[in-house]
Image (cartoon, rainbow, N blue to C red):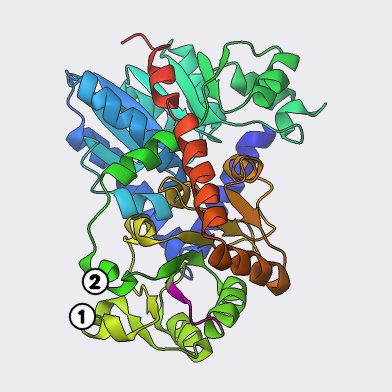
């Protein structure tokens, strides 16, 4: 009852916020049409495999699984649902799925109506998705449901004395594929034993991204023979540090791909620069040769840009948390980030593998970059460590598929 009350209050809150905020408004519009979309697009005689991801990051974890199933079992149709507009709006035209739509709020009526229409052959929920009513309904109908790339921590509600209702939700899964041994131990302690440690499918995804990386002639021309640092998904506190270093070290070139690319933030970056720069959308084969810094003022290129770097700075470590480290590490370059990384297993793994480095202030960043630029062997070895860490942890997708009966 408390869970259902919380979901209803959340639904009301989103409706109240919709007139004033774009994200809730997009969510509401998507929810209003979802059942019509499903009735129009579902093929009644087809078998659907349902994948649910909260947002874009979880989708990227599920994507290798979606695409391998589609390649090996083309007779199945794929339904992909998102909860967040930040996932749906980016991937609503994803060709790897037959239908892409929002998942309505986790109310009993919505769950029954949704599953009545879709009647999936099986379902995959990615990482932290534990929607009680949907899972209960799938379990009641004996539809196999799997949790993929999940990770559990001791402080989660499942392991609290008052978390009995939430522990029961985990029993709805036919199998849970976790990232690490600690997660398996926590689950075993509460009687959840249909669990395998397979790792994180994101490693498979970044290897796939690397194989599909775009050629970017302007960035290749900009790079030349210089040692280049790529600053990916940077925020203002990150930029204050690495731009200060860049301004006084002519031996380096810098590519900045900020997390926010609106004009106001781009102007803030430009105001801090004391060396020649060029914006990517205004670059040509002549002016890139005159620039020491390239600002990526568009989206969708970062995962390909890392291939042109010799090292990477990953933003977010002085805020709520770092962004994707694996997209850079897969190219065999060391990664640097701030202190807010403790919740990211891959960052901790890269640190242990000596392919990543945490800095807490400008002094530490300066000392580290000084060493990278003065010691090519250290730079090379650190990058090799990063690349090896990624390749050594690949294969989760195949491990998951080996447990599934199609």
Per the image, label 1 sits on a secondary structure element best described as loop
Q: Position of residue 84 (x, y in %)?
A: 45, 50
The residue under the point 63% across, 11% down is: 193
Q: Quadrant of residue 191?
A: top right
Under tag 2, what secondary structure?
helix
221 and 79: which one is in front? 221
Numbered badge on residue 284? 1
Image location (x, y in percent) of residue 362: 69, 73
In the picture shown, does residue 54 fall above or below 44?
Answer: below
Q: Is the residue 358 above or below the residue 391 in the image?
A: below
2, above or below 233, in the image:
above
Give the mark nearest the N terminus, 2 or 1. 2
Tell me the crowding category of disc 2: few under 14, some 14 to 19, or many 20 or more residues within 10 angstroms, Cα based. some
253 is within the stretch colored magenta:
yes
**Does residue 255 belong to the magenta stretch?**
no
Report the span colored magenta: 249-254
Please give the name of the residue rendered at 38% of the width and 20% of the height, measured from the top-left corner.
Answer: 398
Task: Count neighbours of disc 1 (C-alpha within 10 A) and say few if under 14, some if 14 to 19, many if 20 or more.
Answer: some
At x 31%, y 49%, the residue is 91
């Amino acid at each position: 009852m408390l869970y259902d009350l919380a979901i209803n209050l959340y639904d009301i809150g989103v409706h109240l916020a919709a007139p004033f905020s774009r994200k809730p408004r997009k969510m509401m519009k998507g929810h209003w049409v979802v059942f019509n979309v499903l009735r129009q697009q579902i093929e009644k005689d087809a078998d659907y495999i349902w994948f649910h991801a909260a947002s874009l990051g979880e989708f990227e974890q599920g994507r290798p699984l979606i695409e391998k199933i589609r390649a090996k079992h083309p007779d199945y149709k794929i339904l992909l649902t998102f909860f967040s507009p930040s996932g749906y709006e980016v991937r609503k035209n994803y060709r790897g799925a037959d239908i892409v739509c929002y998942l309505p709020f986790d109310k009993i009526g919505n769950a029954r109506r949704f599953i009545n229409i879709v009647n999936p052959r099986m379902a995959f929920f990615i990482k932290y998705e534990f929607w009680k009513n949907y899972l209960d309904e799938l379990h009641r109908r004996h539809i196999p449901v799997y949790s993929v790339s999940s990770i559990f921590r001791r402080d989660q509600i499942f392991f609290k004395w008052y978390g009995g209702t939430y522990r029961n939700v985990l029993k709805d899964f036919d199998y849970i594929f976790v990232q690490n041994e600690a997660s398996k131990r926590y689950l075993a302690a509460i009687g959840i034993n249909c669990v395998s440690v397979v790792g994180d499918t994101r490693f498979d995804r970044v290897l796939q991204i690397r194989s599909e990386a775009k050629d970017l002639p302007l960035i290749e021309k900009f790079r030349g023979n210089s040692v280049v640092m790529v600053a990916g998904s940077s925020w203002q506190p990150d930029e204050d540090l690495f731009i200060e270093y860049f301004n006084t070290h002519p031996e380096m070139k810098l590519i900045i791909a900020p997390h926010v690319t609106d004009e106001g933030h781009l102007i803030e970056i430009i105001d801090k620069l004391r060396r020649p720069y060029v914006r990517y959308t205004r670059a040509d084969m002549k002016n890139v040769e005159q620039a020491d810094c390239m600002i990526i003022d568009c989206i969708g290129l970062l995962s390909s840009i890392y291939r042109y770097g010799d090292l990477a700075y990953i933003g977010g470590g002085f805020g709520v948390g770092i962004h994707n480290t694996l997209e850079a590490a897969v190219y065999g370059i060391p990664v640097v980030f701030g202190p807010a990384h403790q919740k990211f297993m891959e960052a901790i793994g890269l640190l242990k593998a000596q392919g990543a480095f945490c800095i807490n202030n400008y002094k530490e960043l300066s000392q580290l970059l000084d060493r990278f630029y003065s010691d090519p062997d250290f730079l090379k070895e650190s990058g090799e460590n990063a690349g090896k860490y990624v390749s050594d942890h690949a294969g989760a997708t195949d491990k998951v598929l080996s447990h599934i009966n199609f």
